[in-house]
């Protein structure tokens, strides 16, 4: 996909987030929206995957370590063809396979169940190590939250990945600087994030995580990096694309009401229309 196509797709992914969370009357829109461009790039450009064969042996793996942003992952999967986009409206509904957190047993395209913060990077490092031991060339990607990396297990996994020189592993930190209780630097500052990953023997790349040119360059740089895992610190805007949600901690885990839903969808329609000019 070219940049314009990626931008248009990201708008559709964001629409799916809002539709799902509104229908569920619950969920986590803020971090799903901030990471929507990352989800879009991974599933439409970067990863070797096949929606018609979700368990393809040689596929690249993705672990959503910050599992509460499942609406963003589900929307990317649906728009990529893993399941009908209409099913996003069943998010969190009784009997729906689209649970509040990713479930690898029931959702096509989900490689790891997640939700307990801090655990996803360990799973991803294990997958990457397995590829090395089996002489497979698939790559593994893990998306972590900047609040999530306050968890000690993240750094145990990072130590393991750096020590084992897992150059088939890419960690993306969605650095929107907001977590459920407020700004991350006020709750329990993880900064400087880049220096910490460097200390664990990662190749570190700082980018604007809502800019496809920078995203594209970073993932290509990570792919060319040998002998060490890569960490992409994606500086993003929480709630990106919806005017009243942007950079607002209150939209970490709250669904829009009907009036707010109309405003949000209008914002995204305008963004989509602007890209079609």
Image (tube, grey):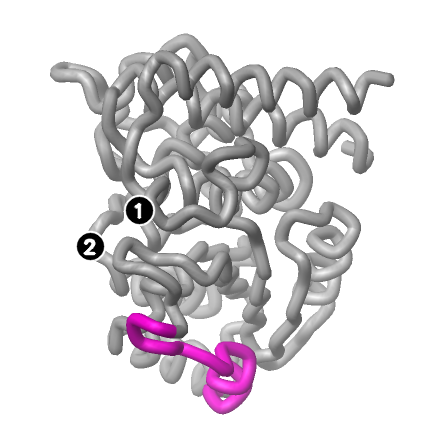
Residues at circles 1 and 2 in contact by the CB criterion of under 8 Å: yes
Find the magenta span and give its range: 186-200
Tell me the CA gap for discs 1 and 2.
7 Å
| Residue 187 point in image, percent of width and height | 30, 71
Density class for disc 1 (Cα within 10 Å; few <14, some 14-19, many ≥20) is many
Counting from the top left corner in percent of width and height, residue 258 is at 35, 13
Question: Is 195 situated left or right of 9 in this image?
Answer: left
- Locate residue 51 relative to residue 47 in the image: left or right: left
Number of other residues with Cα within 10 Å of mark 2, as a class: few under 14, some 14 to 19, many 20 or more:
few
Query: Percent from the top left, x then y, of residue 107?
Result: 31, 28
- Main SS of the magenta part reads helix
Q: Residue at x 55, y 40 (%)?
A: 240
Instruction: Pick the quarter of the image with the C terminus.
Output: top right
* Residue furthest left in the image: 94
| Residue 17 or residue 270, whichever sits in front | 270
| Residue placed most toward the observer, 59 or 174 | 174
Q: Residue at x 74, y 51 (%)?
A: 216
Q: Secondary structure at mark 1?
A: helix
Q: Secondary structure at mark 2?
A: loop
Q: Reply above or below: 202 against 31.
A: below
Quadrant (top left/top right/bottom left/bottom right) for the N terminus: top right
How far across and how far down the image is residue 30, in percent?
42, 42
Q: Earlier in the sequence, mark 1 or mark 2?
A: 1
Question: Residue at image x 49%, y 49%?
Answer: 247
Mark 2 sits on what residue?
116
> Which circle marks residue 239 in the picture?
none
Q: Residue visible at 59% across and 37% down?
A: 40
Observer-nearest residue: 192 or 73?
A: 192
Residue 69 seen: yes
Quarter residue 233 falls in: bottom right
């Amino acid at each position: 996909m070219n940049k314009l196509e990626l931008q248009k797709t990201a708008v559709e992914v964001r629409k799916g987030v809002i539709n799902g969370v509104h229908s569920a009357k619950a969920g986590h829109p803020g971090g799903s929206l901030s990471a929507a461009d990352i989800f879009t790039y991974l599933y439409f450009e970067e990863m070797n995957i096949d929606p018609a064969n979700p368990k393809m042996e040689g596929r690249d793996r993705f672990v959503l370590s910050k599992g509460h942003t499942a609406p963003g992952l589900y929307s990317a999967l649906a728009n990529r063809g893993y399941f009908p986009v209409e099913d996003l409206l069943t998010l969190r509904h009784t009997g729906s396979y689209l649970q509040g957190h990713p479930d690898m047993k029931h959702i096509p395209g989900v490689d790891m169940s997640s939700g307990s913060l801090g655990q996803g990077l360990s799973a991803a490092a294990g997958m990457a190590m397995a590829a090395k031991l089996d002489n497979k060339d698939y790559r593994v990607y893990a998306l972590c939250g900047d609040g999530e990396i306050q968890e000690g297990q993240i750094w145990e996994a990072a130590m393991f990945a750096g020590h084992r020189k897992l150059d088939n592993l890419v960690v993306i930190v969605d650095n929107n600087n907001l977590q459920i209780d407020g700004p991350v630097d006020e709750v329990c500052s993880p900064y400087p994030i880049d220096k910490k990953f460097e200390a664990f023997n990662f190749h570190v790349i700082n980018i604007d995580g809502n800019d496809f040119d920078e995203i594209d360059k970073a993932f290509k740089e990570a792919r060319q990096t040998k002998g060490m895992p890569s960490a992409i610190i994606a500086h993003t805007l929480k709630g990106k694309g919806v005017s009243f949600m942007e950079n607002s901690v209150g939209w970490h885990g709250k669904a829009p009401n009907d009036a707010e839903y109309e405003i949000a969808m209008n914002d995204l329609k305008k963004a989509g229309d602007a890209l079609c000019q």
